[in-house]
Image (cartoon, rainbow, N blue to C red):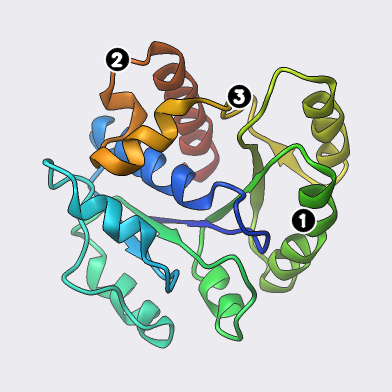
């Protein structure tokens, strides 16, 4: 079983969007996926409650951070992948959560504010000793996106496909779907490609 943590200390970076869409793409790929929402806002769980499918699966309640290890141990043999959404902050328990990960993904919007804020997340991952990769999120077709990629490439790996700025991501937040379950071919292709990249990193 592999554990994937989505983390970013900057709010609005697209953590929950990435978490739910990767969880769906992985489930469509035949993975037995458990989704955990450690963000007090519980946006991941609210989306899941609106789903018609029971994959990815969620527990009746998300574990308290100090109980995460026990939850992961109980999931061994039952699941292939655990996707964990975290809050846009650095609570005291975050380092221990990161240490439980096989891989962390950092969604980053191509904005100066997001690029300035990413250093704190990188430092937290370094302290936890966790491999990570960036995923460009909410990207417009602009020079700013290319410049952000160049900056981030100095600090670590970047997914070869960006999550573009598309209305479908907001729409599926309300419908309980992943974009790979909709008729939006471009969004589906980009998320499927990101999942293939992530799968290659964790396998």
Sequence-earlier tag: 3 or 2: 3
75 over 24 or under it: above or below: below
Q: Residues within 10 Å of mark 2 (few under 14, many from 20)?
A: few
Instruction: Tell me the element at label 2.
Output: loop
Q: Nearer the viewer, residue 157 or 116?
A: 116
Q: Quadrant of the N terminus?
A: bottom left
Q: Position of residue 78 (x, y in %)?
A: 18, 59
Q: Position of residue 47 (x, y in %)?
A: 29, 51
Instruction: Tell me the element at label 3.
Output: loop
Residue 8 visible? The answer is yes
Sequence-earlier tag: 2 or 1: 1
Sequence-earlier tag: 3 or 1: 1
Q: Relative to 53, is 130 on the left or the right? A: right
Q: Position of residue 170 (x, y in %)?
A: 42, 37
- Which image quadrant for residue 156? top right
Give the alpha-carbon distance from disc 2 to disc 1, as whole Å.
33 Å
Q: Relative to 157, is 3 on the left or the right? A: left
Q: Nearer the viewer, mark 3 or mark 2?
A: 2
List the residue tagged with mark 3: 161
Q: Residue at x 45, y 32 (%)?
A: 195
List the residue tagged with mark 1: 118
Q: Residue at x 38, y 12 (%)?
A: 185
Q: Relative to 45, is 130 on the left or the right? A: right
- Which image quadrant for residue 20? top left
Q: Residues within 10 Å of mark 3 (few under 14, many from 20)?
A: some
Q: Residue at x 59, y 65 (%)?
A: 88
Residue 1 visible? The answer is no
Q: Position of residue 107 (x, y in %)?
A: 62, 46
Q: Nearer the viewer, residue 43 or 2?
A: 43
Give the alpha-carbon distance from disc 3 to disc 1, as whole Å.
19 Å
Q: Residues within 10 Å of mark 1 (few under 14, many from 20)?
A: some
List the residue tagged with mark 2: 183
């Amino acid at each position: 079983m592999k554990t994937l943590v989505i983390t970013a200390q900057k709010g609005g970076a697209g953590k929950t969007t990435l978490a739910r869409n990767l969880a769906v793409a992985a489930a469509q790929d035949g993975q037995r996926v458990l989704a955990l929402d450690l963000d007090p806002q519980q946006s991941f769980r609210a989306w899941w409650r609106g789903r018609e499918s029971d994959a990815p699966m969620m527990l009746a309640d998300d574990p308290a951070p100090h109980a995460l290890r026990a939850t992961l141990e109980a999931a061994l043999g039952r699941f292939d992948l655990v996707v964990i959404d975290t809050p846009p902050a650095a609570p005291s328990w975050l380092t221990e959560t990161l240490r439980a990960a096989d891989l962390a993904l950092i969604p980053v919007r191509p904005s100066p504010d997001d690029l300035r804020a990413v250093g704190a997340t990188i430092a937290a991952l370094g302290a936890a000793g966790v491999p990570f990769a960036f995923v460009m999120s909410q990207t417009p077709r602009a020079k700013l996106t290319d410049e952000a990629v160049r900056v981030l490439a100095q600090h670590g790996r970047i997914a070869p496909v960006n999550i573009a700025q598309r209305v479908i991501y907001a729409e599926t937040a309300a419908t309980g779907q992943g974009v790979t379950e909709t008729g939006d071919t471009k969004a589906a292709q980009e998320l499927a490609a990101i999942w293939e990249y992530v799968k290659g990193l964790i396998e």
